[in-house]
Amino acid sequence: MAAKSFEWMQWICLAISAFAVVRATSETPKLEILPLQDKQFQPEDKPFGLTCRGSQENPSLFTELRWISPRGEELKTNDKIVVTPDTGRITLHFLSPKQDDTGVYKCTANFQNSEPKSAEVSVTFYKDITWEECKLQQALVKGRSGERITCKVTASPSPSVSWKKNGKNLNDQRYVIENTHISVKGEVTEEDAGNYEVQAEVEYTGNFDFRTIA
């Protein structure tokens, strides 16, 4: 009986030790960048912020926090960005980012004044979908040939553009379909009347938009 009790106590001690090891591992001090995604896709000209913070319960153990640019330079507040340090964290705000600001941003710090820590995030600033020469009311004149509806879409990366009429894909036997416009083959008839929809999508960024032309 005593031997079994001893074995039971040994098992409990081993279990406690294993739990302590797992807990210690999970609490390894590190820096984390919010939002948590390793890759960020953000439209240019729209304010955006990154926050770097220590993961420990006591953030004051992380000191000398810095943001490093894709060119390896320490970032400081200027007319394009605002860097705000606080206890155990530091925030980087882009006021009006451009595509040229795309790159890998690194956050560095010291843990307990001696152990260096770092984290990084890839940020891509893209040109949002922009509509040009795209009036929401355009007319196809009955009886005329070669009539067109114009709608130019730009973005960076380049968007994929599709056209629909009354919710259905356009018939390429009836229309010449281009990214910037559609043209009616032959003379315009009553069958060409309806609502035309232009859809633009950038798969790389997940950006999507559309316009309806009546």
Image (tube, rainbow, N blue to C red):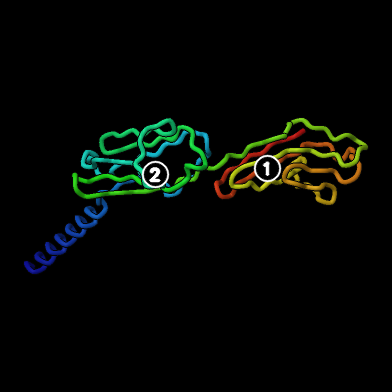
Residue 101 x, y percent position in the rendering:
47, 42
Q: In the image shown, does 201 or 146 lie closer to the viewer? A: 146
Q: Amino acid at mark 1?
A: Gln
| Residue neighbourhood size for the residue with mark 1, other residues' Cα within 10 Å, grouped as few (<14), some (14–19), many (≥20) | some
**What residue is rendered at 84% in x and 37% in y?**
193
Farthest-out residue, left: 2
| Label 2 sits on residue | 69
Farthest-out residue, right: 143
| Residue neighbourhood size for the residue with mark 2, other residues' Cα within 10 Å, grouped as few (<14), some (14–19), many (≥20) | some
Residue 16 left/right relative to 43:
left
First in sequence: mark 1 vs mark 2: 2
Spatial CA span between label 1 and label 2: 36 Å
| Label 1 sits on residue | 199
The quadrant in which residue 64 appears is: top left
Q: How many marks?
A: 2
Looking at the rendering, in which quadrant would you find the C terminus?
Answer: top right
Q: In the image shown, does 64 or 194 lie closer to the viewer? A: 64
**What residue is rendered at 48% in x and 37% in y?**
97
Residue 180 left/right relative to 34:
right
Residue 27 x, y percent position in the rendering:
25, 50
| Vertical relation: 122 (above or below) 87 | below
**What residue is rendered at 20% in x and 60% in y?**
18
Residue 151 left/right relative to 77:
right
Q: Secondary structure at mark 1?
A: strand
